[in-house]
Image (tube, rainbow, N blue to C red):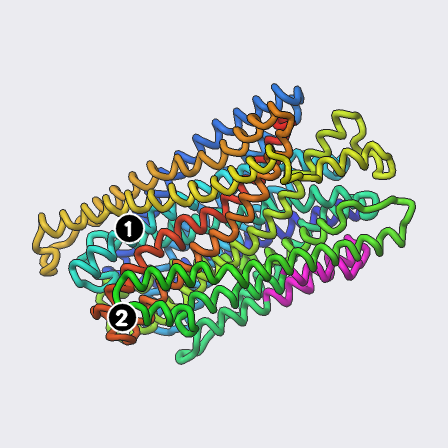
Amino acid sequence: MTQEAWILTFIIAVSLVSLGYAGWLASYVLKKDMGTPRMQEISNAIKEGAVAFLNRQYKTIISLAILTAVIIFGIYVGVQHDLPLAWKTGIAFIFGSFSSAIAGYVGMHIAIRSNVRTAAASTRSLDEALRISLRGGAVSGITIVAMSLLGISLLFLLYGGLSNPLHVPYMIVGYGFGASFVALFAQLGGGIYTKAADVGADLVGKVEAGIPEDDPRNPAVIADLVGDNVGDCAGRGADLFESTAAENIGAMILGIALYQHFGLKGILFPLLARAFGLIAAMFGVLVVRTKEDGEPMHALNNGYYLTSILAAIGFYIATALLLNGNIWFFYAGLVGIVTSILFVYITQYYTEYRYRPVKEIANSAKTGPATVIITGFAVALENTVLPAIVIGTALIMSYYFGLKGSEVEMAKNAAAGAIEGGGFFGTAIATMGMLSTSAYILAMDTFGPITDNAGGIIEMSQQPEEIRKKTDKLDAVGNTTKALTKGYAIGSAALAAFLLFNAYLDDVGELKMKAENLFGQPMTNPLVKQIYDIAHTINLADIHVFVAALLGAMLVFIFASLAIAAVGKAAYSVISDVRAQFKENPGIMKGTSKPNYGRTVDIVTKTALKKMVLPGVLPVLSPIVVGLIFKMFGFGAQAVASFLMVATIVGVLLAIVLNNGGGAWDNAKKYIETGAFGGKGSDAHKAAVVGDTVGDPFKDTAGPSIHVLIKLLATVTLVMAPLFL
């Protein structure tokens, strides 16, 4: 075998070993004690609700995916008259869709079984509870990243990538589109469900009835606990699955531009870097431990730091093996790793109650809900500044590191010609660097709903106060890790979207060169250089291109509006049902009879699935409609490029506003619940609950869904590019 074949074999082997490791973690968790019969009864109710929702949701999503695959097949046959490419793109789309769904199922299967084991462990040891919850979350994190890597590697191998590397990366873009397609609906459906249940439980339970969070008398409490899993676990898992898939494919496409210098190795580099990131995460998960009086967040940070260091070492090895040891490309990868760490700290600053922004919101609660909303929204707008600077700096630094790396390669081999895409390849490597820790980050994210559920189980099973304090400590850390993951996800989405935008421009150039029978010709050919420059030039001064850009910005806002409105309508159904149950059965509040938890779960499930369809279909159709309309004026490909560019910029900033603004409102409420400004039940607390309720659909529905939206737009345009020429 050639060296490249050995490397691809190693990548596939690492993916399989990672899945085996995830199986070992699952076995570790499932062997643990499940606690008292009452704990198991509550856990089973959560499990049944989560599985029922996911089954219904994926039945809808897969039906839509199959229909979309047929449309893709028809477009490639009808427009490009290329039956083999149509089959390969359609199969890749279906494979990406099913891989994402399977990874989501596996991750949540373990998460909804880890909660009761974490609750039982908390009666014995904080350290044991921490390890069970993180390892339960790591099953999801490792499985999702490994499935993504394995799917792309197998498609590349089966489609003949070792012998035809210049064409195969374009054939597998359907895999990224399939992953994005599933991710958007999973994130939307899960986000609508979790926040409708949460808002309903809080407004009727806390504000109207005056009962504590997770009180068993609240008919919406099981629906709320189910929502933590379908939103934060399955939804975010699908988000990062498609991030890694789309980023890998986009980087492989950009690697084609460097083929004359690195050959097949430059195309395989993203896959090898991802494999080393998986290895790093496996070690990071194992080192997490804490003492009984220790701080769980410090233990999780230790695992994250080890993962980051090992990922950086893996990047250096991958650069040495595949990129001729070019240190400038390694520096570009380090930029991505540092960017991920900075995003973690920025998110902490704006969402933790130890810092100024959240304390300002909490202080404003003393004068009522209106000032909570005003102050919180001001904080949300303010927190776009640092992320925008960090993203911009990362892109510029990695671009220039890529240029320097290209100059080094050109000096070594001038006969190979100029490298047009060297700077953009640097930004691609930075994106790989940021996503190199994604498996561990996702483990920390899934840790959140596991510990949240564990706290609910402890509360509902009426365990002693000292046990609740342990789960409260883990739950507080879980809220932080969920906020950090959202910050990490939007930062990586920004870098990945820029990478995919450039991959789209490369795809347009490749299609134009094929039409002129020039594909594969060197840049020294003047006509090739001319086509490349035209494909990579977007003139915003042109009226057609400007209007398309305006429509791209508008799409982000109408999408967010539909997602937030869906939560409001679904929450209304929950609130109405909870009020009705309290009225129909007075024994619920007295504690002499049980609420009908299943009725509320069924209501929110049906409403969430119904409301996810319109905002889910809109971003799939919008770029196609824009491209076809402006094609009539001769600006199809350029119009779609500007639509994508501006939608990405606006989407990144709006997602930051929604994510961190909602997180800040949430933790302002939690800060007051620690005893500040009168504590629970005070007027300040009631005002803060209103702010938290407003922030819920921001941070858990619209914001995270926009992460997926901007990457879905990029993968849709990549797959549908032939339509626009």
In-front residue for pair 68/342: 342
Residue at 65%, 27% in the rendered image:
725
Q: Residues within 10 Å of mark 1 (few under 14, many from 20)?
A: many
Residue span colored magenta = 307-336
Q: As drawn, is 41 to the left or to the right of 394?
A: left
In-front residue for pair 485/724: 724
Q: Residues within 10 Å of mark 2 (few under 14, many from 20)?
A: some
Kindly give the residue lying farthest to the right in the view shown: 415
Under tag 1, what secondary structure?
helix
Q: Position of residue 618 (x, y in %)?
A: 45, 35
> Which callout, 2 or 1, points to the residue nearer the camera?
2
- The alpha-carbon separation of the residues under discs 2 and 1 comes to 27 Å
Q: Position of residue 46 (x, y in %)?
A: 30, 52
Which amino acid, mark 1? Ala
Asked if residue 40 is positioned above or below residue 161 in the image, the reply reads below
Numbered label attached to residue 312:
none
Q: Main secondary structure of the magenta part?
A: helix
Quadrant where the N terminus sits is: top right
Under tag 2, what secondary structure?
helix
Q: Which residue in the structure is indicated by mark 1?
A: 197
Marks 2 and 1: CB-CB under 8 Å?
no
Which amino acid, mark 2? Lys
Residue 267 image-quadrant placement: top right
Q: Position of residue 391 (x, y in %)?
A: 60, 58
Residue at 12%, 52% in the rendered image:
582
Q: Position of residue 167 (x, y in %)?
A: 72, 34
Q: As drawn, is 202 to the left or to the right of 550?
A: left
Q: Which residue in the structure is indicated by mark 2?
A: 366
